[in-house]
Image: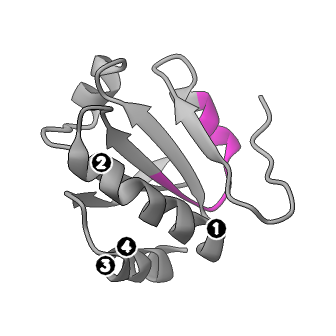
């Protein structure tokens, strides 16, 4: 599985229960994992903010569709969406529930990257 980035542009990686653990282990640095659903308005609203932040800060953005991956949502205690988990070295280091402003997400990235 290739998780490389081209020309400094952020690549969004879509995760499933099958590739989740492998993807986290294969990715160095800070990873933002967006737990979302297609029908969720706030999820759609925050998506471009997450993509922009990932590109600017050089962090990896991964997405988990909770409707298709119930096990992952349960495993990480996702009770409302969007929920963004921040991983470093495979461990959760922070969590944001709801469509937080970019400044809030940026402060977490700055503190954890």
Residue holding disc 1: 55
Say what secondary structure mark 3 lies in: helix
Residue holding disc 2: 43
Describe residue 96's horizontal placement relative to residue 80 as left or right. Answer: right
Residue holding disc 3: 104
Which mark is first along the chain, 3 or 1?
A: 1
Residue holding disc 4: 105
Rendered residue at 62%/35% (across/down): 23
Which mark is first along the chain, 2 or 1?
A: 2
**Which marked residue is nearer to the observer: mark 2 or mark 4?**
2
Image position, residue 80 (x, y; %): 14, 42
Magenta highlight range: 22-32
Q: Residues within 10 Å of mark 1 (few under 14, many from 20)?
A: some
Q: Residues within 10 Å of mark 2 (few under 14, many from 20)?
A: some
Task: State the quadrant of the C terminus.
Answer: bottom right
How many labels, in total? 4
């Amino acid at each position: 599985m290739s998780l490389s980035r081209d020309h400094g542009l952020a690549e969004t990686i879509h995760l499933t229960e099958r590739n989740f653990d492998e993807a986290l282990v294969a990715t160095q640095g800070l990873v933002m994992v967006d737990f979302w659903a297609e029908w969720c308005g706030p999820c759609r609203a925050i998506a471009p903010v997450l993509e922009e932040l990932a590109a600017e800060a050089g962090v990896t953005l991964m997405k988990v569709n909770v409707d298709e991956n119930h096990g992952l949502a349960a495993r990480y205690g996702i009770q409302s969406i969007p929920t963004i988990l921040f991983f470093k070295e495979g461990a959760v280091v922070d969590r944001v529930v709801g469509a937080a402003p970019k400044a809030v997400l940026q402060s977490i990235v700055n503190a954890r990257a």
